[in-house]
Every structure is written in structure tokens, then in C-alpha cells.
Amino acid sequence: MPDDLQNNDTLEEGLRRAGVFHPDDLQANRAGELSAAQKRWLTFEIAGWLSLAGVEMGIVVASWIFYFQHPFGSLFQISLFWGILLTIFAGMCIQEALPILGELRDGQVEAVSGTLSKHVTVVSSRAGSGAIFSIEIHNRSFGIHATTYDAIIDHQSYRLFYTPRNHTLVNIEPLFISDENRGSALASLQQKTRG
């Protein structure tokens, strides 16, 4: 039994270093709520999207002011083109921020527990190739960062806490490592520790 606790502690530490396991937030998450720290994180995310939209609209306004102060025929088409393009980009930023604002206002999280499967999808294009990392529990799939992918052990039990609308992962809690998977989990952790 002490080995099991040590294995889970090692797993928790790996997830904590990857920035996806937040033990201080677990009490609020288990109650179905966002913690104060998670609300701050979502607020910063909203502020980032709205700031980007503000900068884009500021450029649009500045270009129109410049055009009206120096009216040249060719500048009108350039100002119009960039004005439309940046307005579309600003709208997309606002569109990204609004659902997060709804999540923040609701302050709720949902959870799913079970055996987790890791997936990598390789995407190729003319610019090169890349990988999309995801995890799945009970037919619910979540996109994750490569660091998180490395910290998670495939076919282990986890509880994922996520926002209901966007399915944004806010916490990943490792559950007890089963006997049949303990050997492969330890080997994987030791390999990651060495590498």
C-alpha cells in the first residue's frame, strides 16, 4: 500500500509540474464550482482576447483618421481592406471571449471519471507537420498541450474537471493506480524522469 501512495504522489507531482493538477482547487471543483484561482485565470483569458480586439479596433480607427487627414485615392482602398479585415479579427476575438465570460459568470465545473486514453493526431500541410494531442474518457475528448500529454499515463484512472460550455480543462486529478497497470505506470514515469 505505501508503494501505491508513492506512485500516486509521483503522478500528482508530474501533473502539477505540467500545470494541470491544482490540489488547492480540488475542494471547489469537487463541489462543482470554479475556484477563485480558476476564476482569475479565466478573467485573464477574457482580458487577453478583449485586449487583442481593442488593439485591432484601435488600428482601424487610427487608419481611418490618417486617411481623412491625408485623403489620397489609393489609401482609401488600403484603409478599407485593412479596416474590414481587422474588424473581422476583432469580432473573432470577442466571439472567443464571450463563452469564457459565460463560464466565469456561471462559475460551474463538471467532472468525468474513468480510465483515460491518450491520442496523437499527426497533421501535415505544405508548411510542415505537427501533432494534435488529446485525451478521452467515456467518449468525451479534450485537447491538451504536449506537456500535459507527457505527464499523463495512458490507461490510468483520472477525474477531469472542465467548464460545461467550452469543455476547458481546469483540473486533472489522478485516481488510484490499479495493480495491473502499476508496472507500466512506474516504467513510464521512470523513463520520463530520466529523459
Image: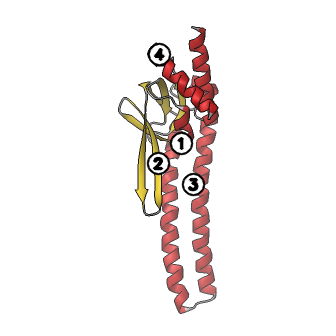
Q: Which of marks 1 and 2 is nearer the N terminus?
A: 2
Q: In this view, does 192 lie above or below 82?
A: above
How far apart are labels 3 and 4 at the CA level? 42 Å
Q: Name the residue under label 2.
A: 131
Q: Do the residues labelled 1 and 2 touch (CB within 8 Å)?
A: yes
Disc 4 on helix, strand or loop? loop
Q: In this view, does 77 lie to the left or right of 17?
A: left
How far apart are labels 1 and 3 at the CA level? 23 Å
Asked whether 86 or 20 is in front, the reply is: 20
Q: Are marks 3 and 4 in contact (CB under 8 Å)?
A: no
- Mark 4 neighbour class, 10 Å CA radius: few under 14, some 14 to 19, many 20 or more: few
Q: Can residue 29 be seen in this view?
A: no
Disc 3 on helix, strand or loop? helix
Q: Earlier in the sequence, mark 4 or mark 1?
A: 1
The residue shown at (41%, 56%) is 124
Q: Name the residue under label 1.
A: 146
How far apart are labels 3 and 2 at the CA level? 25 Å
Identified by mark 1, the residue type is Ala
Q: Which of marks 2 and 4 is nearer the N terminus?
A: 2
Q: Earlier in the sequence, mark 1 or mark 3?
A: 3
Q: Name the residue under label 3.
A: 49
Identified by mark 4, the residue type is Ser
User: How far across and down, in percent of the image, does residue 160 sit?
Assistant: 48, 29
Q: Name the residue under label 4.
A: 178
Identified by mark 3, the residue type is Trp
